[in-house]
Amino acid sequence: MTYGEPTAGMAEAQRDGGGAGHERLSLGVAARLSRYLQVLTQAKKMGKETISSQELSDYTHVNSTQIRRDLSGFGKFGKRGVGYNVEALVTQIRKILRTAGQHNIALIGAGHLGKAIASSEIFADHGFRVVAIFDVDASKVGTDVGNQAVRHIDELRQVVEDEDIVVGVLAVPTHAAQGLANELVEAGVKIIFNYSESLLDVPPEVTVHTSSPAVDLLYALYFYLT
Amino acid sequence: MTYGEPTAGMAEAQRDGGGAGHERLSLGVAARLSRYLQVLTQAKKMGKETISSQELSDYTHVNSTQIRRDLSGFGKFGKRGVGYNVEALVTQIRKILRTAGQHNIALIGAGHLGKAIASSEIFADHGFRVVAIFDVDASKVGTDVGNQAVRHIDELRQVVEDEDIVVGVLAVPTHAAQGLANELVEAGVKIIFNYSESLLDVPPEVTVHTSSPAVDLLYALYFYLT
DNA sequence: TAGATTGTTAATCGATTAACAATC
DNA sequence: TAGATTGTTAATCGATTAACAATC
């Protein structure tokens, strides 16, 4: 039972790999592990000590058998009759996803959405730290948002370099998104999280992830209506 | 894309009976069609008249052969050598997803996030209309957000009934989310879009979709780091 | 015509699921 | 022990891909 290894010749280190696995996870496995992590992180905050695959299934909508299968590919993390230790599982999954460390992100846009993001803990809980907030609007530059001073976009390149920023979050109007995406790319950012509706054109080495709540709603609605 | 979101009773996959489905779409197909719709909607706004499966692939990260396969299951929408007519395809997919109509939604929370959502077009573009905004904070009630007056949460039940609201969007702090989810459920809402981190417990007939940008970032980061 | 792109097939691979023995 | 839940198997289903004829 190997997970996502279109690359041949790496069949080892699977069973009890834990963090020792060297294979790239398949897209599906990586996506699901990330979702388990989301639930586990919150469960941990709520003081929950153990969690069963069925409970994880209820919150993630992933089949419980598949959850057990996903996890057992990396080790025997559970205890029969009991479930999984929440804290230990968080640690294991972070190791598997190699995202145990801290990551600095740049936030572009100090409007309502930017403020909401800056003051939220959703990123912080997963090791992402908003180290700088930028805006093009001179009247916003210098004001405080989420205990940081808003900087002018001209400082972007320098900050990305100094802070080793890989991720940029675009919380700007749709019409301004492509231009600011270009600036992020030029500054060296590799992952752009796009909250606008704009279809962003970027070089192949840059990944764009576009938030699309309406699409998610359409999808949920379809299954409600049928 | 949302990977693997099985719900109970999704076993009815679509039979390729050649054409207009009366059958329920598989989760994967419904999720992908929703994403095509997102891109097409924006492409239409930008004045694009035709789009190829390869272009759709670039923006959605779905294989182009699969896109053609998904679409050809419902009809011959494309023109060889040219591509798909954007406007016609939007209409077709809306029909397939049975979300061609308008849907009223209730927004809970008039903070930064609530304001960002209310003034955004992301929902409106897909036929969702925010018909009411609620908050528990008396000092916010009556103020204008996105050209609507904020109402007190006590009015929720009546408004849901009057406006035939199926979807509720929770843009509130994590600690308040469960209580307000309960109110939404009691008011008769069937789909809750949760922007907080809270793990919401709801009855089985209600669907919760939790926004999780940090999870999406973790996922993107994994593929950048490996 | 020449180039582009769809619609479709067939083969393969990965994901999903039910079921249940193992074991806490 | 009795109940609960994991870890694993085997079967099935869906996704992915290459390839290419059809046709704009």
Image: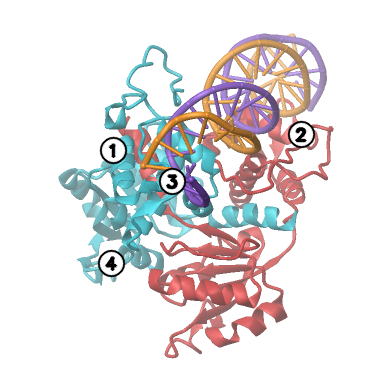
Chain colours: A cyan, B red, C orange, D purple
Q: Is residue B1 visible in the rendered structure shown here? A: no
Rendered residue at 29%/69% (across/down): A140
Left or right position of A188 against C11? left
| Of callouts 3 and 1, the N-terminal one | 3
Q: Which one is closest to the eye, mark 4 or mark 1?
A: 1
The kind of secondary structure element at disc 4 is loop
In space, the residues marked 2 and 3 are separated at their CA atoms by 45 Å
Label 2 sits on what residue type? Gly
Q: Which one is closest to the eye, mark 3 or mark 1?
A: 3
Left or right position of B134 against A125? right
Q: Which one is closest to the eye, mark 3 or mark 4?
A: 3
Asked if marks 2 and 4 fall on the same chain, the answer is: no
Residue indicated by mark 4? A138
The kind of secondary structure element at disc 2 is loop
Residue indicated by mark 3? A81
The kind of secondary structure element at disc 3 is loop
In space, the residues marked 2 and 4 are separated at their CA atoms by 52 Å
| Of callouts 4 and 1, the N-terminal one | 1
Q: Position of residue A39 (x, y in %)?
A: 41, 53
In space, the residues marked 3 and 4 are separated at their CA atoms by 60 Å
Residue indicated by mark 1? A95
